[in-house]
Amino acid sequence: MPDHRILLREHFPNLLETSDPVLDELFSRATRVRLEAGKYVFYPGSRCQGYAFVTKGVVRCQVLSEQGRQIVLYHVGPGESCVLTTSCLLGDTVYPAEGVAQTEVSALVIPAEAFRVAVDRSPALRCHVFRNFATSLAAVMARLADVVFGDIDHRLIHILLASGETRVSRTHQELADELGTAREVVSRHLKRLEHLGWVGLGRGSIELLDINRLRGFVVST
């Protein structure tokens, strides 16, 4: 439990603002889980076995169409919650999408039934769960609107700049999955940016050559 408290205080401080015996009991039942990058966290049709408090790494939640197109819905990092996990636990339904460890992931996992009981008994946990659910759901809605209505160039450049690096280690397919489009579309747009001298294309990476122009494009559109 002491190790759990250290992790919770760092990533979920609001849960420890007041003394709550229900939460003390709940986290005494938590299991520390580690997943390597690329491992599945959940998949369509699977039942949720517990509520995860992510303390390290990133989980990518995505859907795959019958035609093989993949669309990234959202990411879950330290201090955040998975809207699908919350929905499946509270609604007693199966996952409609898949979650994959984008990087190595560590989490504290609470058994499903213990989580449901604690949500009923602990105002602090209930507030945390529903606040994060609302925030995550709003982000998913914004993401879907962006996929349907957003401009590819604008969204592509935004993803490249969001990395905070001058060399982005992402393949064209990974960017296509993030944008909800085909790899060929991403390659075509990147090639145009390369011709403008804004980026340089390499194997599995993209170098940002003119960050000021890239930022200016995002601001002006």
Image (cartoon, grey):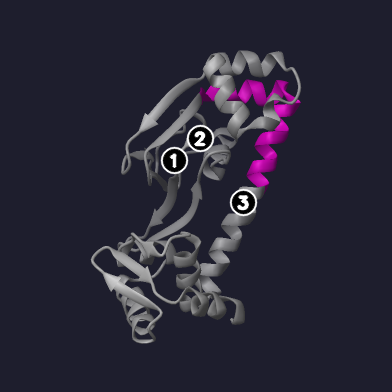
Total labels: the figure holds 3
Q: Is residue 208 left or right of residue 13?
A: left
Structural crowding at the residue carrying mark 2, measured as other residues with C-alpha within 10 Å and reported as few (<14), some (14–19) or many (≥20): many
Classify mark 1: helix, strand or loop.
loop
Of 144 and 203, which appears nearest the observer? 203
The residue under label 3 is 137
Dominant SS of magenta comes to helix
- Does the segment drawn in magenta span residue 122? yes
Element at label 3:
helix
The answer to whether residue 1 shows anywhere in this view is no
Using the image as rendered, state which of residue 116 and residue 173 is in the foreground. 173
Give the foreground label among 3 and 2.
2
From this view, report whether residue 61 is shown above or below residue 193.
above
Where is residue 159? Give x, y as percent.
Answer: 47, 65
Residue at 31 percent of width and 70 percent of height: 183
- Which amino acid type corresponds to the residue marked 3 in the rendered image? Leu
Quarter holding the N terminus is: top right
52 in the magenta segment: no
Labels 3 & 2 near each other (Cβ < 8 A): no
